[in-house]
């Protein structure tokens, strides 16, 4: 399937698809084993977020958003990257870093290479914009961890205090999204060192550094 997947920066007519993908993705996970996590964002709220720009480089958030579509134009997944100077939930993006703020693949498209293609799109974007670090965070117990490791992401070491704070934060905000009997708590921060440089078919959006 991945050969027929196209990834685009969503225009205004496609933002409804972005909201749909994120809502369906979050509704497949349950807080405290009962309540779907859902997505309360409206199309107008998402449009406002995508129209924001970096305070450092004036790069638009929309240029860092990738919507995966199949050959008939149906949505399959979505990735939202954040660069230095962009507001990012739960992460402060450093210079020369691009962070995966969210990655969502619809249940029916999982296991078909869509997630990997979105990650590759994000890496190519980061390289083209002169960045040397690609990062993300993943809840412990998330099956996607295997994909991230195969893609080259490495877990960062966390001290006891950081690990305890992460465990409490995830428990309070997300409950037990992978089931009440799941043994995992907290989240992993992961990083991948990349080589900045031009990537065929990807244009640089920055006038300076990341």
Image (spheres, rainbow, N blue to C red):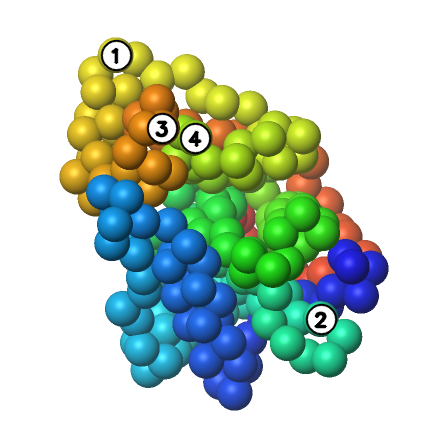
Q: Is residue 167 left or right of residue 119?
A: left
Q: Which mark is residue 141?
A: 4
Q: How far is mark 1 from mark 4, CA to CA?
A: 19 Å
Q: Nearer the viewer, mark 2 or mark 4?
A: 4
**Above or below, comparing residue 3 to residue 122 in the picture:** below
Instruction: Name which of mark 4 and mark 3 comes first in the sequence.
Output: 4
* Residue annotated with mark 1: 160
Q: How far is mark 2 from mark 4, CA to CA?
A: 29 Å
Dots 2, 1 in contact, CB < 8 A = no
- Residue at screen point 43% across, 30% down: 141
Q: Nearer the viewer, mark 2 or mark 1?
A: 2
Q: Which mark is residue 70?
A: 2
* Residue annotated with mark 3: 182
Assess disc 4: are there few (<14), some (14-19) or many (≥20) residues with their C-alpha within 10 Å of its C-alpha: some
Dots 1, 3 in contact, CB < 8 A = no
* Residue situated furthest bottom in the rendering: 13
- Viewer-proximal residue among 68 and 82: 68
Q: Residue 208: x and y, percent?
A: 54, 53
Q: Nearer the viewer, mark 1 or mark 4?
A: 4
- Viewer-proximal residue among 42 and 193: 42
Instruction: Name which of mark 1 and mark 3 comes first in the sequence.
Output: 1
Residue 195 seen by the camera: yes
Instruction: Name which of mark 2 and mark 3 comes first in the sequence.
Output: 2
Assess disc 2: are there few (<14), some (14-19) or many (≥20) residues with their C-alpha within 10 Å of its C-alpha: some
Instruction: Name which of mark 2 and mark 1 comes first in the sequence.
Output: 2
**Above or below, comparing residue 23 to residue 171 in the picture:** below
């Amino acid at each position: 399937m991945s050969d027929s997947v196209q990834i685009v920066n969503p225009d205004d007519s496609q933002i409804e698809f972005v909201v749909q993908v994120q809502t369906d993705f979050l509704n497949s996970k349950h807080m405290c084993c009962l309540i779907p996590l859902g997505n309360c964002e409206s199309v107008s709220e998402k449009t406002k977020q995508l129209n924001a720009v970096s305070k450092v480089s004036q790069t638009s958030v929309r240029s860092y958003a990738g919507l995966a579509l199949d050959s008939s134009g149906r949505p399959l997944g979505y990735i939202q990257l954040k660069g230095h100077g962009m507001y990012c939930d739960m992460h402060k993006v450093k210079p020369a870093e691009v962070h995966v703020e969210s990655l969502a693949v619809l249940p029916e498209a999982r296991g078909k290479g869509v997630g990997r293609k979105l990650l590759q799109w994000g890496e190519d974007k980061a390289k083209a914009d002169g960045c040397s670090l690609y990062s993300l965070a993943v809840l412990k117990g998330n099956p996607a961890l295997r994909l991230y490791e195969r893609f080259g992401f490495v877990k960062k070491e966390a001290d006891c205090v950081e690990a305890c704070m992460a465990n409490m934060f995830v428990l309070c905000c997300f409950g037990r999204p992978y089931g009440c009997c799941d043994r995992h708590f907290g989240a992993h921060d992961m990083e991948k060192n990349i080589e900045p440089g031009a990537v065929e078919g990807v244009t640089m959006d920055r006038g300076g550094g990341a």
